[in-house]
Image (cartoon, rainbow, N blue to C red):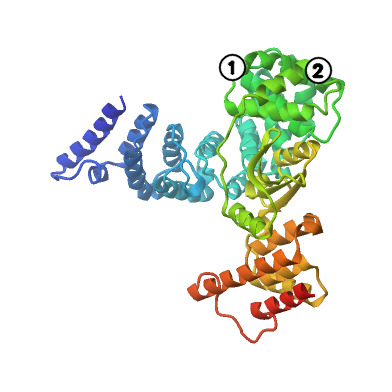
């Protein structure tokens, strides 16, 4: 079927070229002869028939891109909707599920949406956000700007659209109280919309999950959990049951369970235990995380729930880790400091970046996805992770992206100079020696959270010397160091000598 559709599209392009009296390659040049309407129709046809020919889609997107600025926004969003229907295989490049050419097309669409989003209705703009989320290409700032510009017109959005606005906000980790409160209030105060939500168990489960992940236990969340959810506990599907259990665990991780929540959770656990075979791995893993937390929440934690947890643990599910460059740097740092460690080790339901077995210490490297958008506040799921790992007797050290990302040379220099001038700790001297290297902040975090006896001065001196050699090579290659004033008192050489004097002391 895929071959037939591809042949048909190419044939249409070839026929169009032939009508104009040109002998062109049907795939590369023939598409140039099609109008935007024909190209959009071809994209929709390919999407409906699940064609995944990457070359064809890339050429089609390349041809569509220059036409987007001259067409109506609604027609451009039709193309995005078609792309969202294609079952793409995720690729490593650019962290998106689309190819570079499709990313380029989405960039153009995003700019058009920002400029002309008032040209389409609320349904079309919500569908765009849903499609962009499915493609894993959506910028929180774009979503925030568009929704804020329509914040006074939320009465134009349907109940379905309002639910998905909160769903997208949760996906983007956008804990914007203005958006969340306004959307929640619109659902609560409009009886028709609230009734539509309450009659749809999927929408109820979606709203509970979205508000839980945003740590927004507002009036809408309370009403759905305590008045609507009890009526659905016996009709939810396996996936919905798993999602609701996990959502309640995330939302109430810092609270004691009341009798209503306890009863809801127990009923859902009893039901989902008979449907494990219908869950995919990620849902089973969520259930495993929930049970680890519920061991300390449900009093008593019945033997049947412990048996369910044991059965899931024996499955030994493995998810491929995504190791960042900073994780590799930390591994080399721990090696140089003679600290025994293991990487990608499981603790309970989680795989930790590094563990120090002798000290029962886990080290986690946290990128942007572990925090709410443009904040330094841990995401609710990450907080739950740390809470569970600590409950198993481990200490968790977090090395966060803002400890090393975008650290200006001036700030690092001032910090190092201040350390060198004030009779600093041995480990802090190494930070001064490292100066501009991002690993400086990492070492500072690790050294200050570990026991002093773990990192000895001799090992710190080795690290400082290795980093000095590395930075010297980088300067020669012109990779990281720009021209600087050699007369400054805060030069790397002087700071390194200062740090070495402290090490000798």
Circle 1 packing at 10 Å, graded few (<14), some (14-19), many (20+), is few
- Quadrant of residue 252 within the rendered picture: top right
Q: Secondary structure at mark 1?
A: helix
Which of 15 and 328 lies nearest the eye of the viewer?
328
- The residue that mark 2 highlights is 302
| Residue 244 seen anywhere in this rendered image of the structure | yes
Circle 2 packing at 10 Å, graded few (<14), some (14-19), many (20+), is few
Q: 89 left or right of 283?
A: left
Q: Position of residue 420 (x, y in %)?
A: 77, 75
Q: Position of residue 408 (x, y in %)?
A: 64, 68
Q: Which numbered disc, 2 or 1, marks the residue that appears first in the sequence?
A: 1
Q: Residue furthest bottom?
A: 487
Q: Residue at x 59, y 53 (%)?
A: 328
Say the numbered circle drawn on residue 159: none
Q: Position of residue 278 (x, y in %)?
A: 58, 17
Q: Are marks 2 and 1 in contact (CB under 8 Å)?
A: no
Q: Secondary structure at mark 2?
A: loop
Which of 78 and 288 lies nearest the eye of the viewer?
288
Q: Residue at x 38, y 48 (%)?
A: 65
Q: Residue at x 75, y 38 (%)?
A: 389
Q: 261 left or right of 104?
A: right
**Location of residue 455 with respect to 280 vertically, above or below:** below
- Quadrant of residue 239 within the rendered picture: top right
**Is the N terminus in the top left, top right, bottom left or bottom right quadrant?**
top left
Q: Position of residue 46 (x, y in %)?
A: 35, 31
**Location of residue 349 with respect to 267 vertically, above or below:** below
Could you tell me how far apart the alpha carbons at marks 2 and 1 are, in whole angstroms? Answer: 22 Å
| Residue 193 seen anywhere in this rendered image of the structure | no
Q: Residue at x 15, y 40 (%)?
A: 18
**Is the C terminus in the top left, top right, bottom left or bottom right quadrant?**
bottom right
Q: 176 left or right of 73?
A: right
- The residue that mark 1 highlights is 277
């Amino acid at each position: 079927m895929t071959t037939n559709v591809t042949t048909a599209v190419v044939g249409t392009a070839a026929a169009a070229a032939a009508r104009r009296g040109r002998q062109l390659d049907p795939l590369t040049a023939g598409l140039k002869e099609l109008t935007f309407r024909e190209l959009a129709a071809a994209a929709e046809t390919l999407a409906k028939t699940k064609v995944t020919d990457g070359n064809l889609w890339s050429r089609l997107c390349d041809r569509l891109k220059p036409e987007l600025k001259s067409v109506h926004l609604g027609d451009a969003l039709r193309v995005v909707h078609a792309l969202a229907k294609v079952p793409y295989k995720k690729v490593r490049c650019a962290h998106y599920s689309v190819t570079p050419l499709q990313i380029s097309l989405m960039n153009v669409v995003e700019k058009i949406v920002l400029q002309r989003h008032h040209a389409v209705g609320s349904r079309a703009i919500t569908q765009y956000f849903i499609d962009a989320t499915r493609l894993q290409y959506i910028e929180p700032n774009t979503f925030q700007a568009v929704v804020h510009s329509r914040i006074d017109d939320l009465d134009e959005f349907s109940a379905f659209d309002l639910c998905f606005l909160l769903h997208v906000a949760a996906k983007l980790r956008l804990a914007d109280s203005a958006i969340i409160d306004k959307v929640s209030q619109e659902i609560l105060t409009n009886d028709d919309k609230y009734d539509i939500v309450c009659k749809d168990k999927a929408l109820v489960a979606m709203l509970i999950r979205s508000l839980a992940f945003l740590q927004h236990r507002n009036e809408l969340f309370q009403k759905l959990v305590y008045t609507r959810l009890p009526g659905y506990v016996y009709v939810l599907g396996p996936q919905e049951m798993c999602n609701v259990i996990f959502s309640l665990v995330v939302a109430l991780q810092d609270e004691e369970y009341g009798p209503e929540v306890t009863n809801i959770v127990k009923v859902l656990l009893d039901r989902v235990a008979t449907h494990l075979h219908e869950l995919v791995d990620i849902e089973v893993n969520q259930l495993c995380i929930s049970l680890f937390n519920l061991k300390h929440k449900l009093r008593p934690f019945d033997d049947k729930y412990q048996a369910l947890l044991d059965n899931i643990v024996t499955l030994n599910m493995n998810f491929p880790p995504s190791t960042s460059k900073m994780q590799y740097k930390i591994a080399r740092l721990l090696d140089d400091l003679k600290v025994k460690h293991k990487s990608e080790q499981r603790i309970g339901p989680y795989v930790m970046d590094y563990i120090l077995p002798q000290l029962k210490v886990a080290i986690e490297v946290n990128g942007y996805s572990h925090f709410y958008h443009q904040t330094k506040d841990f995401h609710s799921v990450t907080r739950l992770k740390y809470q569970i790992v600590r409950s198993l007797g481990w200490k968790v050290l977090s090395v966060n992206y803002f400890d090393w990302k975008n650290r200006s040379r001036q700030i690092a220099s001032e910090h190092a100079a201040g350390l060198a001038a004030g009779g600093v700790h041995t480990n802090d001297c190494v930070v001064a020696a490292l100066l501009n290297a991002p690993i400086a902040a990492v070492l500072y975090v690790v050294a200050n959270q570990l026991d002093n006896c773990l990192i000895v001065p001799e090992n710190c001196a080795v690290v400082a010397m290795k980093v000095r050699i590395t930075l010297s090579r980088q300067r020669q290659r012109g990779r990281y160091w720009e021209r600087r004033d050699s007369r400054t008192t805060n030069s790397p050489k002087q700071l390194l000598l200062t740090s070495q004097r402290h090490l000798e002391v």
